[in-house]
Amino acid sequence: MLTLRRNILAAALSLIAAGNLLGAPAPDPPQTAGRFRIGPLFERRTEGGQTTFLALRPFFSWEHDPRRDQRDLDVAWPLTTFGRRGETVRNRIVTVFYNDQNRSDPQSSWSLSIPPIFQKGSTRGDDYWALFPIYGKMPNFLIVNNLRFTLFPLYLSYDVGGKTPVRRSYYLWPIFSLKDDPDNPRWSLWPLYGTKKETDADSRYTLWPIWTEKTYHDQQRTKNGHAWMLFPLMARVDTDTEQSWSIIPPFFTRTVTDRGATLLRCPWPLEHYTDENENTWRLWRIAGITERGTREGWWILHPIIVSTHQKTDRLENTRNRFWPLYVFEENLSRDNGRPEVKERYFRLWPLYSRWYTKEAGERLRLLELMPIRDAAPVERNLTPFWTLYERTRIAGTKTNRHDLLWGLIQWTTETDDLGDEP
């Protein structure tokens, strides 16, 4: 029985190495030496006698790009994925994440996390760990640095800012806090009274949010002045760079800047913004129309329905989207005095997509169920299930390769030119 199994396995591997079982395949593109498929379920690609892709969908896929030194392994994606880019490792098993910046360097930064409960790692040899809400010490978390907490919300502290960071410490967060910086310590007892010192401004509040004020002292940007708000009645900004009045903020506001720009809210979320290069009307994300320098466009329910166009002496870009049903994007270059297509993408979801780039060539696909373009894990694990037909052409060649029903039917056609544009 063992010998029989070995013979079967050897025969299968020989068939895989031989190529497509279903007939003579079309010529492979230069970067692919061999390809074997059994419908959308099994696929193996080889290059230079080595396997570069292996998949048993939807359970497993593995891909190796030797040119970029990249490897990706997916097991029951999206549950589990392992990836390597050079010496950088990024792995995930369900909600457990592991990252290593340089797997060959014992002193490199690494982290193991189960957000938001647990994290352990090291940054330049400095070990840290956190078990929320019991105890935590983390060098970076979201937009803050040197995060510490003990029995949160009993104690929390972190650093914010750039060259001169400010330390913020909270006790019974967010009620009592201290802000320490080299110039002046500040404190707050929320919501009764509080102060905050930054590198370019000082802020205060009393009975937050009823009274808040801010004093600007940014010498480098010459932004100096004062701002206050008596919520919900009115607000005022009086600085070197901006003059503004608000009634029932933010609903009725008029702002004028030192550059001649004007912002009018009447009422918010209806806004009109103008300056020497821009004229924009917008109703928040609901609708808008804009002219901004060489760019113009409009939107409805942004980012669902969007149309933009930009044209200069050297380039022309067009974006039209009614997501996910319709997408058209085109980038043209005018460096040689005439329009030249750099990239063009069209999708009529879920039926059809066509993608052309000057560097890679063209790909046409039926069907196209994924509303996000070229998502690598989806391409490896799911896309073949709905790709009934695909046509590809390598940039600078005349050969179109046609692939129907996962290689059951393959043929080639020739174009009249080199196919530099679709």
Image (cartoon, rainbow, N blue to C red):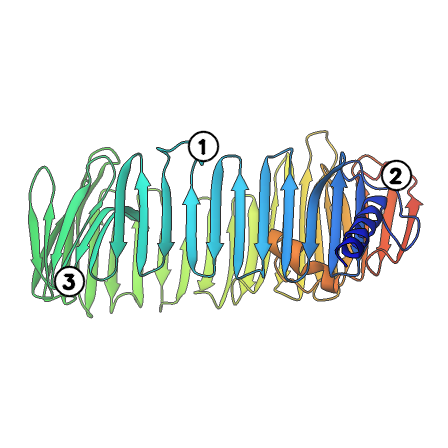
Left or right of 114, for residue 128: left
At a point 42% along the width and 38% down the height, the residue shown is 101
Circle 1: element type: loop
At a point 26% along the width and 45% down the height, the residue shown is 128
How far across and down, in percent of the image, does residue 35 sit? 80, 47
Q: Is residue 383 above or below residue 147?
A: below
Task: Give the distance between the C-alpha atoms of the residues marked 1 and 2, in whole angstroms.
Answer: 44 Å
Q: Nearer the viewer, mark 1 or mark 2?
A: 1
Q: Which one is in front, 138 or 145?
A: 138
How far across and down, in percent of the image, does residue 30 sit? 80, 36
On the question of residue 203 being in view, the answer is: no
How far across and down, in percent of the image, does residue 383 sit? 69, 59
At a point 14% along the width and 65% down the height, the residue shown is 208
Which residue bears the numbered disc 3? 173
Specify which label sits upstream in the sequence, 1 or 2.
1
Task: Give the distance between the C-alpha atoms of the residues marked 1 and 3, in whole angstroms.
Answer: 41 Å
Q: Which one is in front, 358 or 43?
A: 43
Question: Which of the 4 image quadrants contains residue 408?
Answer: bottom right
Which residue bears the numbered disc 1? 104
Specify which label sits upstream in the sequence, 1 or 3.
1
Circle 3: element type: loop
Q: Nearer the viewer, mark 3 or mark 2?
A: 3
Which residue bears the numbered disc 2? 398
Q: Nearer the viewer, mark 1 or mark 3?
A: 1
Left or right of 279, for residue 380: right
Left or right of 148, for residue 55: right
Amino acid under disc 1: Ser
At a point 42% along the width and 45% down the height, the residue shown is 99
Amino acid under disc 2: Lys
Specify which label sits upstream in the sequence, 3 or 2.
3
